[in-house]
Amino acid sequence: MTLKVNAETLKSWLSDKNEIAFIDVREIGQHTKGHPFFSISIPYSLFELNLEILIPNKKTKVILLDQNDGISILAYKAATLIGYSNLFILEEGVNGWINAGYKLFDGINVPSKSFGELIEQYFHTPSITAKELNKKQKNNENCIVIDGRPFDEYQKMSIPNSICCPNGELAYRVSSHVKDINTEIIINCAGRTRSIIGAQTLIDLGISNKVKALENGTQGWFLSDLCLEHNKNKFLDISPNNIETEKLQNKILQLISKLNVSLIDHRKAQELILDDTRSTFIFNVTTSNKNSNQNSFIKNVPGGQLVQATDKYIGVWNARVILIDDGDLIRAGTTASWLKKIGYETYILKKGLLEVKKLKLKNQTIFKKDKLNLLKSEDLINLKNTIVYDIRSSKDYSRKRLKNSIWLNRANLHKQNIKNNDAIVIITDNLEKASLIIKDLEEKKLSHLTKVYKWSQSELKNYPLIMDESIKFLSEKISIDYNFHTHMRHKGNREDAKKYLKWEIDLIKKMDNQELSHFKIS
């Protein structure tokens, strides 16, 4: 028997400061078209693969949200089998939320994006327009442009003469690179959030230089008819010397003291980890994971990205978070300052990675696939009287696929007219994902032979007669696994870029008092 909760009760739970996981089990395309502010996306197609990562404590109160189509019931059963014991389903799914008078938010990483806008509004983070910056560069004024995104994003497109230094590394590296206090520092990202957070990070640290966020980032740059650069490889690979490190550490200690962020040793960390009444997440927030512990309980997520997309890594609101760096405290400290403001109970491991080896860490239980009946590429030539389901992303399926194959998402499996003794082949690029489909098929208790082929583009080139390489456009209604939210901005579409930037700016206008009060900005 499933336990249901109405939207009004759930709304009160989201305000009571206790740990809670509000999980949207719809596919990402459905989620980004509109979801409650605090909902976390764990699509049913990947549910068991991500559930234990995002909700490590199985006693956590978990509420499941769907399209009022029964998928929450399937997810409820799956979570129960894994061992989750405090599960609820939102009555009428997303419709129940709307009917209670509550708003939906489109897009992705909504809490983090909203947080960035709130930071700018509260602290009046200074900014500079693309045209103003371009004028400064043309006049050879004393300024430097630092891109706060990860290196792979920087390489795709960047502001001319910029250098990459991911946000989590800014406080650690910038003062050693910029020696002239008269140099103006401009922080940019692709849009707004990381520009704002990056600039405010340096301001909060008390850097002597003028610091500004580039208004609207690279999108604002090309909307101003200015040219972006591509495939650049300038990375701020500099570390502070011992004297500079000590100065930065003192500033960080003052900052986290004001915010009541605790520095803990390995004994206290161990106590938090073993406390089964709470959810504890541990992150190595350095950009490089070369020293990262291999235990899956510790994730390497650079600090800037952890702040930028918190709901991607932490599935439990009001959870505990322990941050680790190389022991410098600077990267963990700046990241902690933001996570504390977002609303997490945040700690820093004093000696960082040096103390990790002293911890007895939980081996995170991750879904293990059953043994699959695998096909080779040549086996695909003579498929007869066989249903071929392609469970790769709809985007990949639309580009290339086997002839007569049917695109399938796990959420739509129940709509398929599968009969006893049907022969089925699953095409996949993820064997764990295929294992979930096969498990669901077995629960139908039909006698069918199911085989799996793991997609290999290089091998399939040898069998052109079985391939369909025509472009097949799938609609938003069908491609429920694809994020259509202003997606053409990535391809230089001006209208989508304008819509995206307006979406970011307007987020806090949509938030109600409960959503606004969750963040601890002041």
Image: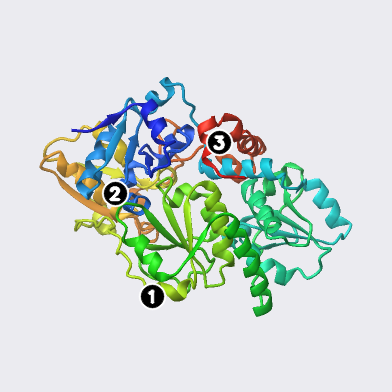
Q: Mark 1 and mark 2 in contact? Answer it, CB < 8 Å.
A: no
Q: Position of residue 431 (x, y in %)?
A: 29, 55
Q: Quadrant of the C terminus?
A: top right
Tag 2 secondary structure: helix
Tag 3 secondary structure: helix
Callout 2 environment at 10 Å: few (<14), some (14 to 19), or many (20+)? many
Task: Note whether residue 77 is visible.
Answer: yes
**Which of the two residues, 49 or 53, is positioned nearer the viewer here?**
53
Between circles 3 and 2, the one closer to the viewer is 3
| Image-based side of 72 in relation to 260, left or right | left
Task: Note whether residue 408 is visible.
Answer: no
Quarter-wise, where is residue 260 in the image? bottom right
| Residue corresponding to mark 2 | 48
**Which of the two residues, 439 or 505, is positioned nearer the viewer here?**
505
Mark found first going from the N terminus, 1 or 3? 1
**Furthest-right residue in view?**
139
| Residue corresponding to mark 3 | 516
Q: Mark 3 and mark 2 in contact? Answer it, CB < 8 Å.
A: no
Mark found first going from the N terminus, 1 or 2? 2
Task: Name the kind of residue labelled 3 in the image.
Answer: Leu
**Which of the two residues, 207 or 102, is positioned nearer the viewer here?**
207
**Residue at 56% over, 58% down:** 335
Q: Position of residue 121 (x, y in %)?
A: 68, 40
Between circles 1 and 2, the one closer to the viewer is 1
**Residue at 85% over, 54% down:** 136
Q: CA distance from mark 1 to mark 3?
A: 39 Å
Q: Position of residue 330 (x, y in %)?
A: 59, 66
**Residue at 41% over, 31% down:** 12
| Residue corresponding to mark 1 | 357
Task: Name the kind of residue labelled 2 in the image.
Answer: Glu
